[in-house]
């Protein structure tokens, strides 16, 4: 069973999913990435048919306000379209220069790109549900039995009249009152987006990094360890919406810090060094050259079972490849 670690420092939230073998996933939340999932008004400034995309200005965006608009890139597969209809295949059929609409910030600018990647077919995500106004219908993560699907389908019928709904695994065992409260919150956000008028302004701000880290925590966690009491108080406030996580919160005593105690700092040092030892005995080497970043997997022979037969395979062992940043 995995535990979630959350550490806070100035302007940054660090998270790690760990089990008895060490870290499985590591996340950093800082800078521009903290604005991801915000909804802002966009204006198409130019079409780029060669990459089947459009350039947009994010009016009233996340840095500098209306007087300093940011740029965004809108790929055709993220372009606006009538819910339930076919997606446009060419950017020129989807938008025109000067057109305004709301977009969701998807990917922050990096060293290679100065523009946000944005999408006009936005969704609003919660812990138990995601509302998908551009994709009608009801969908379930794996693990729901027929009785549960029928019960939740009946409860969500009023919501389905305005938006598609994806029901997530943490919703299993959650009371209908909690589920419907989240549905109402998310539907309120979608209505606010739909009724947003013109003008340069941010429509919906992004949630805090702490809140999104808790929202995206997998089901069946062991504990959620927080670095200090202030972070605990913030988490307790967030989890009024997600009561399944509230009993898991803990602030353990630690001399070296959560990440050091659970082997995460050691894993980060290995990433920086460019040599990562796999549980199977293999190794991943990462080397940067002027032309490319080269990743070499030197896999040890690991034994695994397939349909009752033991086979020797040159593959990484359990958990390999799940460490991400």
Image (spheres, helix red, strand yellow):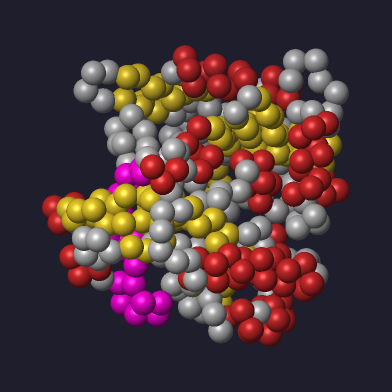
x and y, in percent, of residue 62 in the image: 47, 43
Residue 180 sits above or below residue 123 on the image: below
* Residue 10 placement, left or right of 241: left
Q: Quadrant of residue 190?
A: bottom right
Which residue is at the front of the view, 281 or 82? 82
x and y, in percent, of residue 30 in the image: 54, 32
Give me the residue at 51% from left, 43% from top.
35
| Image quarter in which the N terminus is found | top right
Q: Is residue 317 visible?
A: no
Give me the residue at 37% from left, 40% from top.
68
Q: Quadrant of residue 232?
A: top right
x and y, in percent, of residue 17 in the image: 65, 37
Give me the residue at 64% from left, 84% from top.
158
x and y, in percent, of residue 6 in the image: 69, 34
Which residue is at the front of the view, 98 or 279? 98
Q: Is residue 137 visible?
A: yes
Which residue is at the front of the view, 80 or 19? 80
Q: In the image as oriented, which residue stretches furthest toward the left?
A: 50
- The answer to if 75 sits in the magenta stretch is yes
- The answer to if 130 sits in the magenta stretch is no
Give me the residue at 40% from left, 63% from top.
198
Total labels: the figure holds 0
- Span highlighted in magenta in the image: 69-87
């Amino acid at each position: 069973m995995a535990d979630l670690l959350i550490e806070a420092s100035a302007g940054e939230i660090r998270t790690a999913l760990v089990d008895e073998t060490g870290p499985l996933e590591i996340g950093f939340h800082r800078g521009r990435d903290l604005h991801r999932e915000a909804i802002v008004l966009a204006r198409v400034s130019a079409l780029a048919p060669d990459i089947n995309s459009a350039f947009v200005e994010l009016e009233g965006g996340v840095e500098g306000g209306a007087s300093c608009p940011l740029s965004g890139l809108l790929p055709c597969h993220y372009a606006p379209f009538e819910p339930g209809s076919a997606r446009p295949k060419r950017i020129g059929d989807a938008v025109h220069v000067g057109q305004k609409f709301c977009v969701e910030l998807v990917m922050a600018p990096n060293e290679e790109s100065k523009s946000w990647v944005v999408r006009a077919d936005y969704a609003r995500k919660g812990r138990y549900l995601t509302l998908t106004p551009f994709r009608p219908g009801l969908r379930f993560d794996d693990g729901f039995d027929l009785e549960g699907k029928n019960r939740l389908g009946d409860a969500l019928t009023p919501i389905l009249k305005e938006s598609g709904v994806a029901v997530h695994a943490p919703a299993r065992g959650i009371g209908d009152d909690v589920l419907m409260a989240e549905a109402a919150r998310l539907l309120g956000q979608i209505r606010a987006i739909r009724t947003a008028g013109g003008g340069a302004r941010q429509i919906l701000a992004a949630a805090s990094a702490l809140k999104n880290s808790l929202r995206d925590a997998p089901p069946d966690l062991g504990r959620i360890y927080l670095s200090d009491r202030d972070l605990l108080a913030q988490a307790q406030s967030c989890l009024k919406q997600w009561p399944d996580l509230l009993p898991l919160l803990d602030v353990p005593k630690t001399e070296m810090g959560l990440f050091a105690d659970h082997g995460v700092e050691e894993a980060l040092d290995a990433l920086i060094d460019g040599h990562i030892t796999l549980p199977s005995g293999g190794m991943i080497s990462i080397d940067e050259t002027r032309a490319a970043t080269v990743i070499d997997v030197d896999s040890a022979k690991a034994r695994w079972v397939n349909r009752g037969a033991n086979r020797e395979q040159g593959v990484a062992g359990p958990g390999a490849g799940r460490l991400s940043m």
